[in-house]
Each structure stands twice: as C-alpha cells, then as structure tokens.
Amino acid sequence: MNPLDAEPEARYAALSAMQRTCPVHQLPGGTGYMAVSYPAVAAGLRSINAFGGSAAQDGLPEEDTTIAGILEPRHLQIRRIINNVVSVHRSQQIGPYLAAFSRDLARAMIARVSEGSPTVEAMGAFVEPIPPAAMARLLGFPEADSARYYEWGAGLGVNIAKAVTAGQSMALRDAGPEMASYVEERIAQRRAMPAEEWPNDALTRFLTTEVDGERLSDRAVVTQIMFAIGAGSDTTRNTLGSMLRRLAADPDLYAEIVADRTLIEPAIEEALRVDSPAQFLVRRCLVPEFDLEGTQISSGDALFLSIGAANRDPEKYPDPVSYDLRRDKLRDHLAFGTGPHTCPGASLARLEMKIAINVWCDHVASFRLTDGYSWEHPRTGMLHGPARLFLDITPR
Ligand code: HEM
C-alpha cells in the first residue's frame, strides 16, 4: 500500500486505509510525515510559519526560488505582485479569446467525427491545447509557441525529481534551460519596445508592478513565469479531462447539464474535489516542534499534505467518491490549496473550464467512453487525471 502510488486506485486505497487510523502518519524509511484528513491538510497548508519551502528549492537565491518555495515574510510581499499579475478581473478579460479558441477546437473535432469514426481522443483534440493557450494569451506570448509548454513542463518535472532524489536543489532555469531562454527572449523583446507601447498583459505587469517600492528583477520574473506556466497547464488540463471522463460515464447527468448550464460550475468544483489534479504538496517543518492534529513534527521533517485524501475525507464528505453536484459548500475543497499560498490562478482555471464545457455542450449532443477504454494515468502519483480519453461522440 503506497500513498504516493502513480496508479490512482492503489493510491486512493492506501490513503483511505490511512484515514481510517490516524490523520497524520509517519512515512516508512524516515522520509517524513503525511497528513491525510481534511482538518490536518488544511491546518498544515495554513500554518505557513511552521511549514514552508518547496521541493529542490532549499538554499537557492530568492531570484531563483519559485513563489511556492519563498518563505514569509517575503512570500507575502512577492505574492502581492503575482496577485496583481493574474488578478480575477484581468483573467476574465481573456474570456472572449478563450471562447473562440475552444469553439475552433470543438468544430475541428466534430468535423473529424462527421467525416468518419465517432471515436475521438478528447485530450489531444479538445482539452490539451486550452490551458497553455490561456497562459500564452495572459502573458502576451505567441499562441503557436504554447504547444511546447507541456514538453517544457515535463522536462522541468523530470529534472527537479532527479534533484530531489539526489537531495539537491535546482533552479528552474537549470532544470529547463530552453524554456528559460525562451522567456528571457520575450522579456528582451518587450524591453526593446518604447514603454508607452507595452501592452497591458501579464508580462508587462510582471516587469512593472511595484510593491513597497520594489519590482522583481528580470531573473526573478523568468523564475515566476516558468513556474506559473508549469502550475497552470497540467492541472487545468487534468481537471477538464477528469470532468469529461465523469460525464462520459453518466449520460443522464450530462443531459441535465446541457439543459441547465448553471450546473457547470458545480460540475467543475466536484471534479476538482473528487479528482484533485495536484494530489499532494510537500513542505518542511520550520519550527522546533509542531503538533499537527496530535502528531509531533520536528524541525526539518518533510510534511506531505495529501490534497487528494483530504478532498475524499468521509468525515467531511459523505459518500466521498460519488460525483455529486448537489453537495453543500462545493467550493470548500482544497484542490487549490488554502491559506496565503492558495492558488492565484484559480479564477483563470475556473474560467477556462467553464468556457470549455459550455462550448462542449454546444457541440456534443451525447458522448460515452469508447468500449474497452481503460484509464491511462499520469506517470507520477503527484498528478491525477486522464492521460488520454477515448470517447464516442454524437454531434449536435
Ligand atoms: C485546475 C487548475 C489548478 C489547480 C488545481 C491548482 C492548484 C494549486 C495548488 C494546490 C497550489 C498550492 C497552494 C498552497 O500551497 O496552498 C497552487 C499554487 C499556485 N498556482 Fe495553481 N492550480 C491551478 C491552476 C493554476 C493556474 C492557471 C495558474 C497560473 C495563472 C496557477 C498558478 C499558481 C501559482 C503561481 C501558485 C503558487 C502560489 C503561492 O505559492 O503563493 N495555478 N495551485
């Protein structure tokens, strides 16, 4: 039983068994502790002075440390810059672009279905291009280049995982030199333009937002942009994919949503809860001793916070595995974290998903999982969602 298993059923079974005995467990081999109950995970996430840092970031200069790994009080200062860069109302401005982009994908997918087989691989045909295109639009980067974001993100993931295994720290610019050069070029291009011609996009806001008289250096902007692109792509992709997988398995629910589009928002929140795309976060204990729901954690100990388990805690969610759009307090889940590090991209992610599912409903009369489809999952237990999704589609 491995709570970090890449195979979702095995992982969730291990987490559920752990939940039945204790909210916080010591992991075998002295690798740290894991919080699995909703209250323990929420408390761990909110206790930012007791638990902080991020994998492979220890000891790096601040310019090379992602916002997730910067400790207080600096995190809150830099977070104010990031909040301005991806504020709710600014994210909403890319809505019309996203609607047109999603419609083009849906039309191309339906055209292929109309010409031949009803089966589509929906991740490639519809879901995957949307999150990177949204990030590119937000940043003011060329749309065509966004096709490379996943490959770059995967490269970062592999190299950071190697560093973690070797007990070393690694800056994102070293884990993804090609991606770093790409972002540096975008900054150089912007700096070559007269200031009055700079568009009001996230890149300009990254370079010009001042908090307490301070701006980020170009080197720090590269770090934060690389991190935001990584943080915003797979997560949103996986949630959209999980939602389509759930709806494919329940044609009556899909018909209900098509008839009453106000159900799209609950459908998104339930997908975030039951299929949380970021399954866990890892922090380090920064204080001599901390009592987390009855377990003593000491300075330097690693703390794994299982968002996946917390969001299926039966004490918090009756019948936690069912996809139930009529639950109370649907936004209470921890899929975006909680506390001062809470995901600043949540409103953008929700916007992307709401637009995409609306467009899907406009174009697809009904759909189901292709016969014999078996879930291909991500290669690590950190992410959750379908790698590929074969659907039989009936166009509207
Ligand atoms: C469904 C989509 C998404 C999910 C589930 C998700 C989830 C998360 C989670 C769990 C955290 C950690 C919160 C914590 O430590 O308490 C986080 C942080 C973060 N996310 Fe997201 N995210 C998503 C989309 C995005 C998008 C679209 C962006 C970019 C605009 C983004 C940018 C970030 C950043 C910059 C942080 C670090 C914040 C900090 O440490 O202060 N995320 N996200």
Image (tube, rainbow, N blue to C red):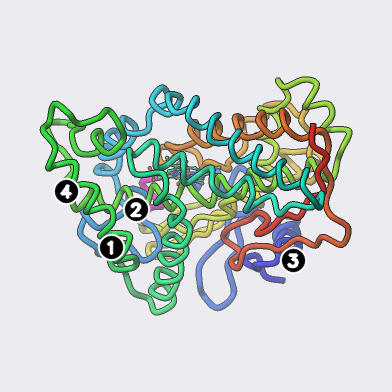
Q: Which mark is residue 188?
A: 4
The nearer-to-camera label among 3 and 1 is: 1
Residue type (three-letter) at the residue carrying disc 3: Ala
Q: Which mark is residue 173?
A: 1
| 322 in relation to 28, above or below | above
Identified at 59% across, 30% down, the residue is 355
Where is residue 83? Give x, y as percent: 34, 32
Q: Which residue is mark 3?
A: 10
Identified at 64% across, 49% down, the residue is 125
Q: Which mark is residue 142?
A: none
Whether tag 2 and tag 1 are in contact, CB under 8 A, the answer is: yes
* Dot 3 or dot 4, earlier in sequence: 3
Q: Which residue is mark 2?
A: 226
* Dot 2 or dot 1, earlier in sequence: 1
**In whole angstroms, how far apart are the C-alphas of marks 2 and 1?**
8 Å
- The reply to whether the residue tagged 2 has its Cβ within 8 angstroms of ligand 1 is no
User: Badge 1: few (under 14), some or many (20 or more) residues near its Cα, within 10 Å?
Assistant: some
The nearer-to-camera label among 3 and 4 is: 4
User: Badge 2: few (under 14), some or many (20 or more) residues near its Cα, within 10 Å?
Assistant: many
The magenta segment is 47-52
**In whole angstroms, how far apart are the C-alphas of marks 2 and 3?**
32 Å
User: Badge 3: few (under 14), some or many (20 or more) residues near its Cα, within 10 Å?
Assistant: some
* Dot 2 or dot 3, earlier in sequence: 3
Q: Which residue is nearer to you in this view: 351 or 339?
A: 351
Residue type (three-letter) at the residue carrying disc 4: Ala
Residue type (three-letter) at the residue carrying disc 1: Arg
